[in-house]
Image: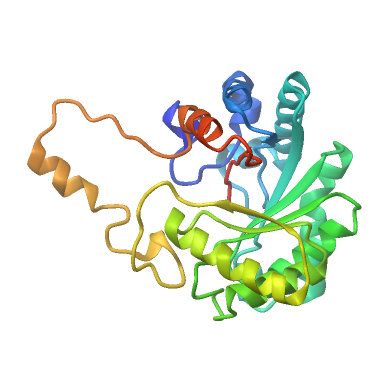
């Protein structure tokens, strides 16, 4: 979203062809977050390669993702920090009933570029189903790289109502080194979910590291899905703006460098990662 605001990414698809078209813009944002205190720089890659259209088809995922790795790795080396690659859920492939072998093959295709570029850590994020997340962990763990996994769940659990604690235990037993939640719930709900995960992990005698990336605003009553399911998203703000008739409106969202700087100054002992999300 930060790159979209700067004119480098198209709103809607949010795909990262800007790594080829506008590499300086991507590099600059990486540097801003690294200088603000990020310990890990994550490559701005594209996970899927089926039915590409427009600029994605023109460049192809290999060219886009290699450029993304070059940019992230370069900035990580400049700042002496870690370089990460990231994959995400397979979406309709899993929902339509594709089996474990098919899904794991897709994950192997996604991480191939990261192995070629020798990333320091591989992150799997935005998983709504713990079963699919387990398969992702198995694939990443087989590479020998540190393995992080984040689910987009809240206190009620995954999309099949598997409780957060059970999700965490299953992921730890699958081999995850870092477990957490991201991108669908506000800080209060995200921390509540992490608490449930930690309680279950402690009871099971498992000690993975924990991570959290909440959305940067209040999101009550969001059920299993999180903020995308509430009526206020994304239209609740506009009627208020129309009534106020502002002369100038400057939007503020969470993924900006100043918020990273403030986070680092406030929580100096917390390991911090700036993360791009691209579905």
Horizontal arrangement in the rendering, residue 244 relative to residue 265 (left or right):
left
Residue in front for this viewpoint, 135 or 190: 190
Q: Quadrant of residue 176?
A: bottom right
Q: Tally the numbered discs.
A: 0
Q: Is residue 46 left or right of residue 115?
A: left
In which quarter of the view is residue 228 placed? bottom left
In the figure, is residue 22 to the left or right of 246? right
Residue 52 position, x and y percent, is 62, 49
Task: In the rendered view, tell whether residue 15 sits above or below residue 76.
Answer: below
The picture places residue 190, in percent across and down from the top left corner, at: 50, 59
Q: Position of residue 54 (x, y in %)?
A: 56, 41
Quadrant of residue 161 within the rendered picture: bottom right
Determine the residue positioned at 13% across, 31% down: 246
Instruction: Please indicate, yes or no, whether residue 66 appears anywhere in the rendered image.
Output: no
- Name the colour scheme: rainbow
Residue depicted at x 61% and y 18%: 24
The residue located at (70%, 40%) in the rendering is 60
In the displayed structure, would residue 62 be above or below residue 190?
above
The one of 153 and 268 positioned closer to us in this rendering? 268
Q: Nearer the viewer, residue 205 or 239?
A: 205
- Residue 51 seen in the current view: yes
């Amino acid at each position: 979203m930060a790159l979209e605001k700067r004119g480098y990414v198209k709103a809607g698809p949010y795909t990262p062809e800007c790594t080829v078209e506008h590499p300086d813009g991507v590099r600059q944002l990486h540097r801003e977050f690294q200088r603000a205190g990020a310990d890990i720089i994550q490559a701005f890659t594209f996970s899927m390669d089926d039915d590409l259209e427009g600029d994605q088809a023109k460049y192809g995922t290999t060219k886009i993702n290699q450029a993304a790795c070059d940019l992230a790795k370069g900035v990580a080396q400049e700042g002496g920090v870690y370089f990460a690659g990231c994959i995400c859920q397979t979406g309709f492939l899993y929902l339509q009933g594709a089996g474990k072998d098919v899904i794991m093959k897709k994950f192997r295709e996604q991480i191939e570029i990261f192995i070629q570029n020798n990333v320091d850590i591989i992150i799997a994020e935005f998983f709504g189903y713990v079963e699919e997340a387990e398969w992702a962990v198995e694939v990443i763990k087989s590479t020998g790289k540190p393995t992080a996994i984040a689910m987009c769940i809240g206190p009620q659990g995954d999309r099949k109502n598997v409780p957060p604690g059970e999700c965490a235990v299953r992921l730890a037993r699958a081999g995850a080194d870092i477990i957490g939640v991201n991108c669908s719930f506000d800080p209060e709900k995200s921390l509540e979910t992490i608490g449930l995960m930690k309680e279950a992990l402690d009871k099971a005698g498992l000690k993975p590291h924990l991570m959290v990336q909440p959305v940067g605003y209040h999101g009550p009553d969001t059920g299993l899905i999180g903020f995308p399911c509430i009526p206020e998203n994304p239209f609740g703000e506009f009627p208020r703006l129309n009534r106020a008739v502002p002369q100038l409106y400057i939007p503020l969202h969470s993924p900006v460098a100043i918020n990273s700087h403030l986070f680092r100054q406030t929580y100096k002992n917390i390991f911090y990662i700036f993360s791009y999300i691209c579905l």
